[in-house]
Image (spheres, rainbow, N blue to C red):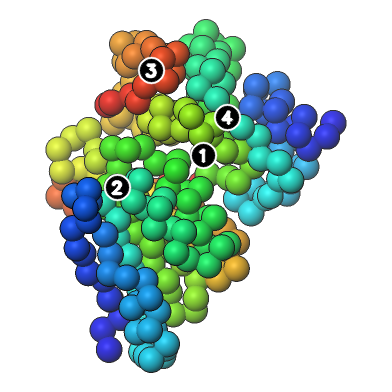
Amino acid sequence: MTQDDLLKSFLHMNVQLEALKTAFGRNLLQAEADHPATVTAHDVAAAIEKYLSGDISKEMLLDWVNTLWFTDLYAYDDAESDCIASVMSVLETLDEEDVPISPDDWQKMLLCLATNTEYME
Amino acid sequence: MNGRASGQVNGTLGTQTTIEQSELKNIVKSNERAVQAIQSTYSSKQSAVAGASSYPPPIAKSAKSFFKGGSNAYRNFTVSRQSDDSYHFTMEKPGNVPGSKAIYHKLVSAGGETLRVYKDTFDPQGNLVHRKEK
């Protein structure tokens, strides 16, 4: 699998974080890609749908969010960057008990992603 | 020499910006050993991303990447150059509970290599509630 294919596979949640670490090194914060993969609003919506349907765990979604946000392996689509960042900012708190995400919040985030508008908490 | 050297003026669009980077660089050159950190503060994500361009290319790239990940609801975006020429970026996220907040941190080497990324969460009283390493 090429580097580009691996990044896309992780983006679409077809491989887990460990596969990236095997390819790019244990410390992904220092990893570099020849061509960072582009993250779209559709990708974020798809990830949320997988989580809400139970296809992926909370831990998997969190790994995904943190990797896309804090490493240089991925970059948000310029045209959708603000929308994506507003939703990822919420997803990053998924493991914080004092920041619950209600069913209504999830639907609002999905609507924002579908319309490329910023999600306001 | 006080190591903190930052000032704010109102820009034409009403956003606040720092004093000129060239002024800061002159201060650093003349007081190299005495300077502990030089900090620039930006009130908005947009101004922070734009301001990052004034730093050396690898630092600018890292700062832009970090700040772009933040929401437009964030505030107090900072870039601090440390005495060892490493850099420290921060951005603040208001909490859902009034007065609470989270601060995201990114530390990079002089060459732009990411050293550490973490998030500190504070309660309304300013107490550190937890720190999450990324």
Residue sitting at x 50%, y 22%: A41
Say whether residue A100 is left or right of residue B124: right
> For numbered disc 3, what is the local secondary structure?
helix
The label nearer to you, 2 versus 1, is 2
Q: Are marks 3 and 2 on the same chain?
A: no
- N-terminal of the pair, mark 1 or mark 3, is 1
The label nearer to you, 1 versus 3, is 3
Query: Closer to the camera, B69 or A62?
Result: B69
Residue sitting at x 52%, y 44%: A70
Label 2 marks a residue whose chain is B
Query: What amino acid does circle 2 point to?
Result: Ser
Numbered badge on residue B44: 2
- Label 2 Cα neighbours within 10 Å, binned few <14 / some 14-19 / many ≥20: many
Percent position (x, y) of residue B68?
44, 43
Residue sitting at x 54%, y 18%: A42
Query: What amino acid does circle 4 point to?
Result: Val
> For numbered disc 2, what is the local secondary structure?
loop
Percent position (x, y) of residue B82?
43, 74
Quadrant for residue A59, please give it.
top right
Farthest residue to the top: give it: A53
Distance Cα–Cα, label 1 vs label 3: 18 Å
Percent position (x, y) of residue B8?
21, 64
Say whether residue A37 is left or right of residue B125: right
- Label 4 Cα neighbours within 10 Å, binned few <14 / some 14-19 / many ≥20: many
Question: Do callouts 1 and 4 mark residues in contact (Cβ within 8 Å)?
Answer: no
- Which residue in the structure is indicated by mark 3? A112
Label 4 marks a residue whose chain is A
> For numbered disc 1, what is the local secondary structure?
helix
Q: Is residue B22 visible?
A: yes
- Which residue in the structure is indicated by mark 4? A39
